[in-house]
Image (spheres, helix red, strand yellow):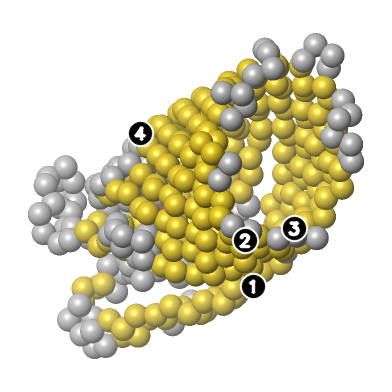
Amino acid sequence: SQEVRLGSGDSSEAYQWAFGGYYANRSTDSVAGSLYPAGLFHPQLGFIQGPVPDYTTSMLSDEDTALFWESSFNLENDLTLTAGLRYQNSDRSINRSSSSSSLGSSNDWDDVLPKLGATYSLSETDTIFASAAEGFQSGGFNFYDGTPESAQFDSAESWNYEIGWASSWNEDRTHTRIAVFYSDFENYQVYRLNPVNPTQAYMVNAEEATSYGVEIEAETEVAETLMLSAALGLVNAEFDNYTDSVLRGALGPMAADYEFSGNDINFVPEYTANVAAHIKLPWNLFMLWEVQGIGNYWLDEANTAEQDSFALVNGRLSYKRENWELFVYGRNLSDEGYSNNALDLRYTDYSNPAAPRTAGMVLHMPGWPRTFGAGLKASF
């Protein structure tokens, strides 16, 4: 991928502008398979008479091109107006074959995305701001070995609104920010496990969804070598209109749990919190210690499998020069166990879907354990 950006050079000028382009090209190969033993009941094949291999090979190509422009104008009455426009085109193609079917298809999605914003300085230390912007996520194809109709998912669009207040304190050593937001989604993209074969997953569109919440941030310079920061986010996210057509097609119209309208959006925590210490050391060394708190969230759209709140401890040590940085990091240093996906495999009595489901299990996919790594960043 590559992004090229040109902008106004003098930041003191009232009019600021930026113009640029973006290009990315990615290819992904995937092989997934299962061996069903004799006597197993398969939702599509019935009782299996002998060992049956089931595998899928897929080749997916993605190409994204975008042009963008953004300008801001600072008026003499402390009001700054911002406007932007982005055009994005995304091409997707897939070649997929399995033991039972094959598929070759391509499509492209594009959109023009406007952005409007305004900031007003109440004083030298206080500013209020507001913005409205359209968001876009390209459609694409699933590796999942389903029907040609279920192989493709549509692009997602959203309108995102934000209004807030920012302030500085303590001789500009402390900064605070609070904002409320609202997002309205169309064709929201949901990533879910395949109930017929949990080794596979696919993307499906929820027709309508909304989210809203509040974000609070603060940072303070305790000393020349120590900066403390904290953040809290509260969010409510809900599927307004969502029927999983892929799941219904796989399990049939009598199957339960393909209607998710009114449920909370999975993987969206009730809250997120962050406390961090940024430490400047001698010899151009910088250290970061961070504790992340993640609130309860649902692991599935049916809201039957829930991840309890948990905390992660992260650390980072970096060596910085003028235009490059070498760093090492550790994530989840306490090796906290948590789930980042789940599939409800409990038996459902389709004659009475509301009856308690006591037989079977909920299959949980674990999140990242304690992880260490290193990297190099450079800017030109």
Residue 262 is marked as: 4
- Mark 2 or 4, which is nearer the eye? 2
Local secondary structure at mark 3: loop
Q: Residues within 10 Å of mark 2 (few under 14, many from 20)?
A: few
As drawn, the label of residue 322 is 3
**28 with respect to 49 (left or right):** right
From the image, tell me which residue sits under label 2.
283
Instruction: Tell which tag, 3 or 1, sits nearer the viewer.
Output: 3
Which residue is disc 1 drawn over?
A: 27
Q: Decide if residue 92 is in sight here.
A: no
Marks 3 and 4, how far apart at CA: 51 Å
The earlier-in-sequence mark between 2 and 3 is 2
User: For the residue labelled by badge 4, is the local secondary structure a helix, a strand or a loop?
Assistant: loop
Q: Amino acid at mark 1?
A: Ser
The residue depicted at 39 percent of the width and 48 percent of the height is 291
Q: Earlier in the sequence, mark 3 or mark 1?
A: 1
The reply to whether discs 3 and 4 touch (Cβ–Cβ < 8 Å) is: no
Question: Which of these two is toward me, 274 or 226?
Answer: 226
How far is disc 3 from disc 1 in space, using C-alphas?
34 Å
**Residue 48 can be seen in this image:** yes
Which is closer to the viewer, label 2 or label 1?
2
Please tell me which of labels 2 and 1 falls first in the chain.
1
CA–CA distance in space, label 2 to label 3 = 13 Å
Three-letter code for the amino acid on which mark 4 is drawn? Gly
Q: Quadrant of the N terminus?
A: bottom right
Q: Quadrant of the C terminus?
A: bottom right
Residue at the image point whose x is 25% and y is 62% from the top = 363
Is 377 drawn above or below residue 16 in the view shown? Answer: below
Mark toward the start of the polypeptide (2 vs 4): 4
**Looking at the image, is 205 positioned above or below residue 249?**
above
> Mark 3 Cα within 10 Å, few/some/many (few <14, many 20+)?
few
